[in-house]
Amino acid sequence: MNPHQQLQRRLGVFDATSIGLGSMLGAGVFVVFSPAAGLAGNFLVLAVLVAGAVAYCNAVASAELAARYPASGGTYIYGRKRLGEWPGFIAGWGFVSGKSASCAAMALTFGHYVAPDYAVPVAVAAVVALTVVNMFGITRTALLTRVLLCLVLATLVFVAVAAVLGPHPAGAASGAGGPGTGGHSAGGLGGVLPAAGLMFFAFAGYARIATLGEEVKDPARTIPRAILAALAAAFVIYLGLALLLQSHLPDGLLAATDVPLLDAVLQSQLAAGAPLVQAGAAAASLGALLALITGVGRTTLAMARERDLPAPLARVGGRRPVPFVAELAVAAVVILLLVTTDVMTVVGFSSFGVLIYYAVTNAAAFTLETHPPHAPKWLNVAGFGGCLLLAFTLPAASVLGMAAILAAGAAVRFVVLRLR
């Protein structure tokens, strides 16, 4: 690799943790509890615990590998180094294709909160603006992420206070909705795994830390600390919100609403503060979008370096070196998705792709010769099995859709390799 094409190590533990936590507290925190409650019913908290357990397995595997291979690309690089080119490609292609759809969804969520009648143009403008921020270097990205994260955390504290103050309807704590109400009874123990599959993606932001491995100072120390700190903070927040929402919202509302945190405030003594929740959701969407664009751009850069994507995407330049061609390409794809597709349908496919990505992470970590005490080798087996279990309990349309995208990418790579 040409040294002039390398990125610079500028991020410390705090910056890297902020980027990871900003990803995990994206727009999903404002919406994910409703569909999860619809699937798991009274067992919503159990779904959060299952998702957190699988996320921990994946996080420690990512931390081990990122400390060993501190380069841009995350599991794409780990898969290539430990398992071979094909597992690495499947992980990288699943991440790039799936997360590009997630970028579009985050941008559209921002548009709906800010200007519902002009959601797509506002979403496109957000993608353009955040891509420009990324062009000024990773430290500017980290600074804006910290600002947005502070707004989101302040919003979540406000929601928690509103939920504690109440008033609390008589049926809320039990969550015993009647059949057909859309309440908690619509789900149950059998829905815990699909609900955990949804909740898992709320925790998946630590991958953004690993994909920035080439831009982190002292990666062997910084990356594991940042990943575990971000995951621990996100887990506490999601678990706390699940408990508060189930005990506070009226019977049936949690599973039926599209805006559970907003309704939690509207159903409280602090209802006048509802616009603050809307502003927080908008900030969360921007924070997640910023981290996603950054992570997808770095994985695209890594794949281009290995010629699994067109070589020009590997170009790095600027006074603060950034993968500007990859960033522009990601922005172009996201904008294309926004203006030509039903984004919210497409993004469902990404869930399967990300779980396959982390299955490769665990398989790669399993091959390491040594493991720290907090990450024994059996955790890699548990993480691998957990990822596949959650992946194949997703709706069939999501599984088949993303499987088709992965197969198409593999077919193109096979043809290109044969031509070479």
Image (spheres, rainbow, N blue to C red):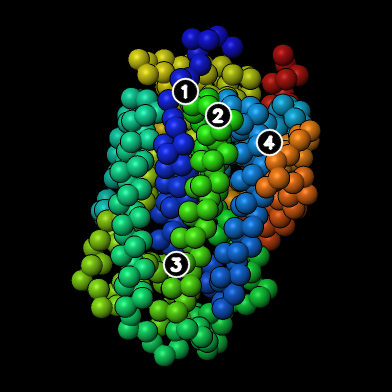
In this view of the protein, can residue 402 be seen by the observer? no
**Residue linked to disc 3:** 241
At mark 4, the secondary structure is: helix
**Residue linked to disc 2:** 219
At mark 1, the secondary structure is: loop
At mark 2, the secondary structure is: helix
Residue 274 drawn at (x, y percent) = 25, 67
Left or right of 142 in this view: 358: right
**Residue linked to disc 4:** 90
Is 245 placed above or below 174 here? above
Instruction: Name the N-terminal-most of marks 1 and 4.
Output: 1
Residue at horizontal 36 percent and vertical 76 percent from the top:
164
Instruction: Name the N-terminal-most of marks 3 and 1.
Output: 1
Is 63 placed above or below 239 here? above
Under mark 1, the amino acid is Arg
| Residue at mark 2 to residue at mark 1: CA–CA distance | 9 Å
Residue 389 drawn at (x, y percent) = 72, 57
**Residue linked to disc 1:** 9
- Frontmost of labels 3 and 2 is 2
Residue 244 drawn at (x, y percent) = 43, 73
Under mark 3, the amino acid is Leu
| Residue at mark 3 to residue at mark 1: CA–CA distance | 35 Å
Residue at horizontal 75 percent and vertical 53 percent from the top:
382
Seen from the viewer's position, the closer of residues 273 and 407 is: 273
Q: Badge 3: few (under 14), some or many (20 or more) residues near its Cα, within 10 Å? A: many
